[in-house]
Image (tube, coloured by chain):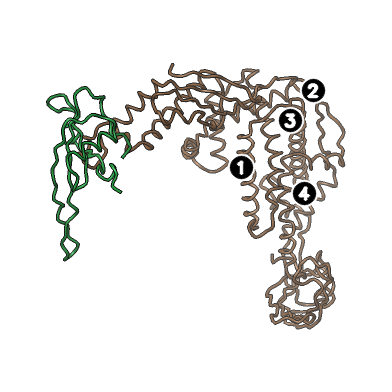
Amino acid sequence: MRTVWDIIKSPVITEKALVAKEESRDGRQLLTFRVDRHATKPEIKSAVERIFQVKVDAVRTINYMGKKARRGRFEGRKPSWKKAYVTLEDGQEPFEYGESI
Amino acid sequence: MFMKTELVDISPTRKELKIEIDAAAISTEYDRVSDRYAKAANVPGFRRGHAPRNIVRQRFKNEIRAEVLQHIVPQAISAAITESSLAVIGEPDVRLDNDAALDKFGEQPIALHAHVEVLPDIALGQYKGLEAARRTRPITEEMVEETIRELREESSSLQPVEDRGAQSGDIVTVNFRGRFIDPPAEEDITVDEVDVEIGGPGVVQDFNDHLLGTRPDDERTFTVKYPEDFSSKGLAGKEIEYTAVVTAVRVKEVPELDDEWAKGMGEKVDSVEGLRAHVRQNLTESAQRESDFRLRNELMDKLVAAHQFEVPTTLVEHQTQQLLESTVRDMLQRGVDPREREVNWEGLRDMLRARATEDLRGSLLLERVADEERIEVTDEEVAAEISSFAEATHQSIDQVRAALTKQGGERSIADRLRNRKAFDLLIENASVRDEEWREEEVEAKVDETPVVSGTSTADQLTAESSNSAVAGDGESRPNE
């Protein structure tokens, strides 16, 4: 059975993501997650709301092509993945990813 | 201050320090360490040094926590020690009390307790006017003659005998071949160049009988039946057929007691009378030293017996270890390998521990006396001690100093001098009466004194080995 945990895989914690979170232009918090490649925006929205008990305003997604990888003469790809930028509604508690994921 | 402390007495030498470090102090230190980590940390997704503090903390939780504790705990303990003005010996034994504070690091105060050992407060009782007897061994004419006889014996030389067969008292040098008859054994015994003193101590009678009257190049064959209780186990109870080839017969020539020989014995000696006086003087001096030594021991025993107090375990263990090491060194020096011998290490350790405790009692008491009397050691005295040590060991003063500084020993020399002075004071103030020399009591006493009992341990340990070494093949003394 697919659960919310299958949709949201892990938070993306990078410099870029943290900058986006702390300094989003309109003061709303912007979270970033690695999500299932086939998850839709509404699915992501409800999953984040259920897991973190927050109100989500909007979801934007982007597909990343897996990087090319080569083992000797065999060329392949790392798995492709989808990233979701989740904008929270105004006036939410400051969000911490915590160690939950 | 950044902490609260509380001192609990457990025993005269053990104290417990209860310490609570304020949360603020911890969080300051926590931030400091975290920032240092953040500066260098490599975290995926971030350029080096650009990861924020909380992420670095998450990632290096244990490392940072350990470092903070390592820094702040010893600081707290030494502060607590200074605050309570304890003279601590050894390392404190530290336990953290609330593990919960570790999870919410930097938010809660950390409670810990440390067990430390301190020197006991010694209530100094009577240390002046201790009673002791000085007994000096009287030097008799016989003792002087005996010593001179030994000297002659030592300077005796072996002269080859040509015109007669070996007599009792002669030294016969023999090459032996021994064949085991009962029980038979594959290996023969082959020993060359053995010196046998005919009729000498420890020589098996059979050898005396068969070697009597031999001349160089003589060959004798005879069987020897060793008694069951023979000292060398490999031979006890066995019957062996020996073929002995005599290579030399020599006689021991003891020099005549005359002025000529006496002159050779010392630079300042020019006659037999002079030698006698010299020997007498030496004996007197050593008797003096002996009685002095015994007097010191007696005083020390009395002082220690009059003051019972607890000795810190750390010190006792340390001292025991040292004694044990020196015992082993002693054994090695005599060519005994303790690993090959069955040594009752536990028993030995217990024995040495008892001795270490007494030794420490003594030196702690002397220190206390030195404090009481305000005995100081000047730099000049230390320097004098160092130079006399340098002279005794044929090193330059600088060498000795360098070696000492490396071991932090200049202090220890000062301490030793201070104790010695305290001891001298003890003796000056003791009421010493001169008494008759009593032989038998001395023997009993010598056994008890700690210094001597140490050597006797080693003796017990090595007794068997030295026996078999000397009488290795049962028939002879070692080559000379």
Q: Earlier in the sequence, mark 2 or mark 3?
A: 3
Check the rendered structure and report the hue given to chain B: brown
Position above or below: B56 against B249: above
Measured as percent of width and height from the top left, residue B250 is found at: 74, 71
Q: Which mark is residue B272?
A: 4
Q: Are marks 4 and 3 on the same chain?
A: yes
Q: Is residue B246 visible?
A: yes
Dot 1: few (<14), some (14–19), or many (≥20) neighbours within 10 Å? some
Dot 2: few (<14), some (14–19), or many (≥20) neighbours within 10 Å? some
| Near-viewer residue (A64 or B289) | A64
Residue at mark 3: chain:
B
Residue at mark 2: chain:
B
Q: Which mark is residue B431?
A: 2
The reply to whether the C-beta atoms of the residues labelled 4 and 2 are less than 8 Å apart is: no
Element under label 3?
Answer: helix
Q: Which amino acid type corresponds to the residue marked 4 in the rendered image?
A: Val
Q: Which amino acid type corresponds to the residue marked 1 in the rendered image?
A: Gln
| Near-viewer residue (B319 or B443) | B319
- Which residue is denoted by mark 3 in the rendering? B300
- Which residue is denoted by mark 1 in the rendering? B322
The reply to whether the C-beta atoms of the residues labelled 2 and 3 are less than 8 Å apart is: no
Q: Nearer the viewer, mark 4 or mark 1?
A: 1
* Image side of residue B171 versus residue B377, left or right: right
Q: Are marks 1 and 3 on the same chain?
A: yes
* Image side of residue B230 versus residue B332, left or right: right
